[in-house]
Image (cartoon, helix red, strand yellow):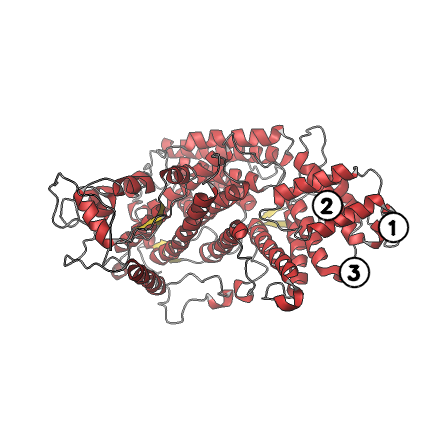
Amino acid sequence: MPTSFKANPRKLRRTQNACVACRQSKIKCSGEEPCTNCRRRVMRCRFVETGSKVMVAERYFQELQNQARLQQQQHTFAVRIPSGSTCPEDRCPPADLPQAQPIDHTRSIWTSPFSLPSRILKDARDSKRNWIWLAPSSLWSLTARLKVMITEKLSLESLNNSPGLLEGDVYALQWRDAAPNDPPDISGLPSIDQALYLFNTVKFHLGQIYRFFDDEETFVRHVREFYQGDAVVKASECRLWFVQFLLVLAFGNAFLSRSRGTNDPPGSKFFVRATSLMPDLASLWEDSLLAIEVLAMMGLYRYSIDYRESAHVYVGQAIRIAQLGGLHTQLPEEELGSRTLTRCRNLWWTLYIMDRHFSSSVGIPMTTHDCDISTLVDPSQQDTTLSLQVKLSRMLSTILATIYKTERMQLGIFLEQTRSILHTMAGHAQEIEKIIHLKFQNSLDTMPRGTRHITLSYHQCVIVATRPLLLSILKERLEKLDHGEEDWQSFLAPTKALINTGIKSAVKTLQILSDEDSLLEVFLPFELEFTYGAAIYLTMTRTLFPRVADGEAGSHNAHSILDEMISKGNKLAEVRKIELTQIESLFQQLAARIEQQGLQTLTLSSPEQSIVSASTVYNNINDNDDQGQEDLATATAIDPQTVVHCMPGDSQSPSGLLPQDTSDLEFLENIGISSYEFLSIVDGIDDNFGILDPGQGWEG
């Protein structure tokens, strides 16, 4: 196989047998086992078996790599995370797993912070709702949970009487249902030019992820018929379309609104009118696809103004209508036509993404199971963003079903589950890397809107996956607050890399949202959620691990983002800033109590000490060092786009793909995306399994 390496005239002395990590990083190895570098970086030190090197065809070598990866995925984990096609009922552990036994090695047990019975709060307001359930995965329940945990332990005054916990606390909506036979109210509507402008505005803000307008020509034709003909007759005959038209006006005005002088949500005058005109459920079957679009848009608007529970109900209705039409299955293109099939697919995956996000927000199980879905994502190049968003949504549901459990388990099993999730995340990181490479070939350095959203969704998955670890440490820290010193090393040692990963994702999230070259989304709540979730995460880590860097900078970025949203009229951002300030104050008081009692300061090694960054590996690969050239020329396949990091005989080595373009690498590091780093963390977790030796009584 021809190689493009040039001979180096200067022959450097090198170790005869360098370890895998030193070879990949292109640094000098001491040759010991473990070597000096691996001991310093707290990594497992592995040496490949020396022997003759064989030259093979590139295609054959790539086939061997693919076979090795497939075998690794099939046999790596004793406890498997269910794939996207696995139903919840298939996730039960095998019957022959050892039963839980009482033991003294408490650090070997992962104690979920979400214990049973469930945590609730009394609802003191004038309503028939007597209690509020604190769901494990809900970000808003997390706020209340943290307030309760700290105020109870520190004997402080309760703070759970602040607004923003239930829908209707921030914005109030009132309407009266219109009689079915009464003509719709068409007064106060914008001109046709402004209506079409609002429609294009809505497409710009929603089009990448939320596919409500695949039949754009039909919608525009209805608009022209409405304005150029008898508007009352058109609205009466096409009542459901007129509801969709009012929703478009509501979203369009909301996206453009910057008013702070009203207590009503932006665009609400059109939304309330649309709600009052909604037909009953029996009438929705006359045009099921349009009904699905309308119900989904109703749900999205409600979710955007903090009506999360009713939003979930609307999306649930849309999903039921879609399932009765078979949208979750592979429908026949010959009978429906390609346009209708594409519309059905896009509608289904829009509902899927909304269901995963809304369900996790309110903290309840997903409406649909992945094993029941057989429809495909549109394979066209322009839908790569949608495809990856679907995968990230599936990843989020897997995280919630796997990690957010209430039972105790072996810490090793918990780490295996997390390791499997990170392994999948590394695969998604590779896809983002490819998208970045393709979309930035002719770009002017500004991240496309769809790519920005999936990048933030990616970091959200990392934060959500590692947040229970922080909650568990916080819970135990509070329980041991008055009991003096305690040894944390046995618990923190195998979890440091995970927590560091979460910290990096939280920091990168706030950095991306603080970028002055990007347009901050104000009405849709997702960037507000990303901001608030990352800020809470960093607030917790700053108190639990005081020496962690970037904590203060992250808090400053979060407050700046919230201030910008507030300045543009977002009342939800005002409430979140109040809640964030309260949480920060509580954690400051907890930090003061820890310092006052002279308790052990918990520390995390910096990510740089245990993870080799993608750019470092890339730069080292391109060095003209004789040792690395000889190893890479024989052991890896090189194509024009990627370098595969894999060593012969090393089935556990990271297999992440690094972009060939250094500008891509710099941008990926700026947004915190690196499949190589994630696979390094996966290996690091595997290294720490030696700490959790089942022979020493590590049974849960």
Disc on the earlier residue, 1 or 2: 1
Tell me if 579 is positioned left or right of 295 in this view: left
| Mark sitting earlier along the chain (3/1) | 1
How many other residues sit within 10 Å of disc 3, few (<14), some (14-19) or many (≥20)? few
Q: Residue at x 57, y 55 (%)?
A: 364
Q: CA distance from mark 3 to mark 2?
A: 18 Å
Query: Where 414 falls versus 95 (above or below)?
Result: above
State the image quarter where residue 612 is shown: top left
Gap between marks 3 and 1, in whole Å? 18 Å
Kind of residue indicated by mark 3: Ser
- Label 1 or label 2, whichever lies nearer to me, is 1
Q: Nearer the viewer, residue 383 or 417?
A: 383
**Residue of label 1:** 233
Q: Secondary structure at mark 1?
A: helix
For residue 375, what is the image quadrant?
A: bottom right
Crowd around label 2: few <14 · some 14–19 · many ≥20 (10 Å): many
